[in-house]
Image (cartoon, coloured by chain):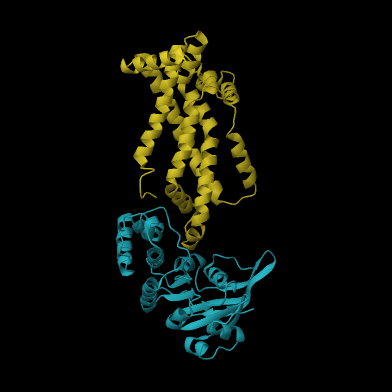
Amino acid sequence: MVSPILPLMLEDVELLRGGRRILGPITLTVGGAGITVVMGPNGAGKTSLLRAMHGLERVSRGWVLWQGEAEDVRARQAFVFQTPVLMRRSVIDCIAYPLILDGRPRREARKAAEKQAEAVGLGVTLSAPASVLSGGERQKMALARALVRSPEVLFLDEPCANLDLHSTAEIERILIAARDDGTRIVMSTHNIGQARRLADDILFLFDGRLIEAGANAAFFAGPGTPEARAHINGDLLP
Amino acid sequence: MNDIVEGLWQAARLVVTLDSDLAEITLRSLQVTVTATAIASAIGLPLGAWIAVNRFRLRRAVIIMLNALMGLPPVVVGLIVYVILSRSGPLGVFGLLFTPTAMIVAQTIIITPIIASISHQAIRELWADYHDLLISLHATRRQRIATLLWDGRRALMTAALAGFGRAIGEVGAIMIVGGNIDHATRVLTTAIALETGKGDFGLALALGFVLIALAIAVNLALHMLSGTERGSRW
């Protein structure tokens, strides 16, 4: 039995850029199962928080603490970027790439990638270059690539930005399936409806600070801060 | 104008009749240049990628130096290689002076910075696209470089072809270290220089046209083999 890498604990995490604080200080714990949705207006620090959790940003102060060895911890997470990174390869090779990095034989990796592509409903010719995919297909491909290693924790930075309703519904279906399979999901979104549908709990950021954290129902029933209330109501914030 | 027309005719005649001297120096040109390009690519491509993905203290200085070395004067390179390989030089014991090997060494020195510099530029752009993904996937440094070299292979082929183009037309350095010895180190460019010196402009031009045709043929062959400029390629 492999010991879990969760809970993830952030202790007084701060991110400074050019002497300016863009995030923090934030202290929180991500544990258990389900989907955590990070919300907040543009520039609130949602992407920076996800990147700091995943280790893509080195924090200026504080600690990001996972359970287990650093090498092992990173390999058991995945990150889906807002703009999917398209490798100059075929769709199938893009999805199989993480497994190739793990040293899996090419044939075996491609087989697993094919299965994953099918699981996310990627109905395209898998031998086609990734660059020919549509926006929704690119995001599905990125999700398939992230899920092919069966990560324990999956970070997604606004996975449905610029997608139509149909593609958004498909991505949400994939995320729910991943959650049901035991993947812990932490994602950011601007889409309040999506947060209502998917979130088990909400982190609300404003101006780099975590000003509200709680369960989905409680957050949407009665946000405790004027900023969160205004955000949910779609009011313009100064 | 007459010289050019005569040169074209003579080139056609040499090619059609499969002139043995022409075949010999053409093959030697190809052998020397392809070998030098292969060695320079083996050094320059990973070097360019390594510089692109690593941050180290003198990185900027190394890049500036590489760019500067792209304009290395071939005659100076030839002179330095000559001194090193000459009987009294540090590597004189190997007896390589006035051999095709010496010509390969000189050409390799000339084109390695070109290949490294162009590949560094191409890989740097790819690295900017791939950076977050490769870090996120926990790729090792070696895996990152291998991925960038593979996915950037078309741009890197251009780098290798630029090196090939420079080497195949090079005359100064290989004249010094090769000596333009008939049936030993004579190649197309040194033969052109010789015929021009003798005043046989027709033959010199004919060899020149063969040289141009050779360079184009190699480029075409590589592009066709790699499938660049085809629809839906990545």
- x then y, percent, for residue B62: 62, 42
- For the point 48% across and 86% down, the residue is A216
Answer above or below: position of A126 versus B203: below
Q: Place residue A98 in its image quadrant.
A: bottom left
User: Quadrant location of the C terminus of chain A?
Assistant: bottom right
- x then y, percent, for residue B104: 48, 27
Q: Is residue B191 visible?
A: yes
User: Quadrant location of the N terminus of chain A?
Assistant: bottom left
Task: Indicate left or right for B87 with B104 as reference.
Answer: right
Nearer the observer, A131 or A176: A131
- x then y, percent, for residue B94: 50, 22
Answer above or below: position of A22 versus A198: above
Q: Place residue B153 in its image quadrant.
A: top left
- For the point 36% across and 34% down, the residue is B221
The yellow one among the chains is: B
The cyan one among the chains is: A
- For the point 42% across and 55% down, the residue is A87
Answer above or below: position of A79 versus B158: below
Q: Is residue A34 visible?
A: no
Q: Place residue B61 in its image quadrant.
A: top right
Nearer the observer, B209 or B110: B209
